Image (cartoon, grey):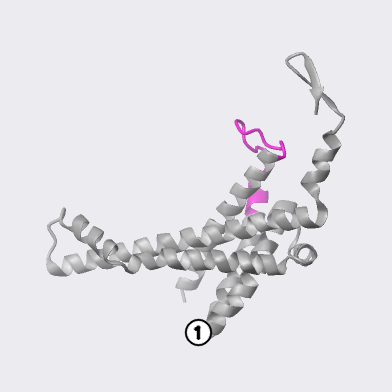
């Protein structure tokens, strides 16, 4: 019973960090954040609220694995893009849970096939990456590392078990972070496809003159 909340907390932390990184890159691209100074407008309370919103999406995602076998994988493939598009919308646009869900469905109009295809590709790449752990290279590296310690046979087995578990958890969280990042980037793709936000910002600069080092040029 204690493993579920611990898993939710760890996965939420990874997802939230991925969302914050995407938000920071977006702010730098739009000129809203100085790359040298960073974003100093986000309060601790806002971060805590954003973390809790992400935790809601992560909890719902983890509950999917209570379904039996392949059904859980199929449902997760269809639901994951929706859940973490929803999480990215809430985080980026500072919306509530229900308004964020409504906004997510409006952004998915005509884009769900692309989202499901992207997540399938990410899931396939993540699975192949995770399968590396079951190759002879992994066990060879563990044997090389264990040679540097004076371990009994029982101690060597314990070391290998702990090491494999730690590496497996690390790789799993890394792959999950890549999935969340892919869904977060899909948010901006859907936003541009539906509303052309960045294009409109660029069009507003046409004809404007900006001064650089005392000289004027077209924006």
- Where in the figure is residue 45, as x and y percent of width and height? 66, 49
Magenta highlight range: 30-48
The front one of 206 and 213 is: 206
Say which quadrant the C terminus sits in. top right
**Residue at x-position 59% and y-position 47%:** 21
Extreme residue in the right direction: 207
The front one of 37 and 6 is: 37
Rendering quarter of residue 89: bottom right
- Where in the figure is residue 140, as x and y percent of width and height? 23, 61
The front one of 123 and 24 is: 123
**Residue at x-position 64% and y-position 74%:** 78
Mark 1 residue crowding within 10 angstroms, few (<14) / some (14–19) / many (20+): few
Question: In the picture provided, is 82 more to the left or to the right than 154?
Answer: right
**Residue at x-position 28% and y-position 62%:** 137
Extreme residue in the top direction: 214
- Where in the figure is residue 159, as x and y percent of width and height? 23, 63
Whether residue 121 appears in this view of the structure is yes
Relative height, residue 26 to residue 8 (above, below): above
Check disc 1 and report the residue beneath it. 69
Q: Main secondary structure of the magenta part?
A: loop
- Where in the figure is residue 216, as x and y percent of width and height? 80, 18
Residue 126 covered by magenta stretch: no
Question: In the picture provided, is 207 more to the left or to the right than 185?
Answer: right
Question: In the picture provided, is 16 more to the left or to the right than 91?
Answer: left
Extreme residue in the bottom direction: 68
Residue 43 covered by magenta stretch: yes
């Amino acid at each position: 019973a204690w493993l579920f909340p611990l898993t939710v907390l760890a996965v939420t932390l990874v997802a939230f960090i991925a969302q914050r990184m995407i938000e920071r890159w977006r702010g730098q691209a739009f000129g809203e954040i100085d790359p040298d100074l960073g974003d100093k407008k986000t309060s601790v309370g806002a971060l805590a609220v954003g973390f809790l919103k992400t935790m809601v999406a992560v909890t719902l995602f983890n509950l999917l694995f209570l379904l039996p076998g392949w059904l859980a994988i199929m449902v997760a493939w269809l639901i994951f893009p929706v859940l973490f598009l929803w999480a990215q919308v809430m985080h980026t646009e500072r919306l509530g849970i229900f308004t964020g869900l409504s906004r997510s469905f409006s952004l998915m109009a005509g884009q769900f096939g692309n989202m499901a295809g992207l997540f399938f590709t990410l899931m396939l790449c993540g699975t192949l990456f995770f399968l590396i752990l079951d190759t002879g290279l992994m066990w060879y590296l563990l044997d090389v590392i264990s040679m540097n310690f004076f371990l009994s046979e029982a101690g060597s087995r314990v070391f290998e078990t702990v090491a494999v578990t730690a590496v497996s958890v690390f790789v799993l969280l890394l792959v999950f972070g890549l999935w969340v990042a892919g869904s977060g980037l899909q948010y901006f793709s859907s936003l541009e496809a539906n509303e052309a936000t960045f294009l409109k910002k660029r069009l507003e600069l046409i004809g404007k003159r900006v001064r650089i080092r005392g000289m004027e040029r077209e924006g």
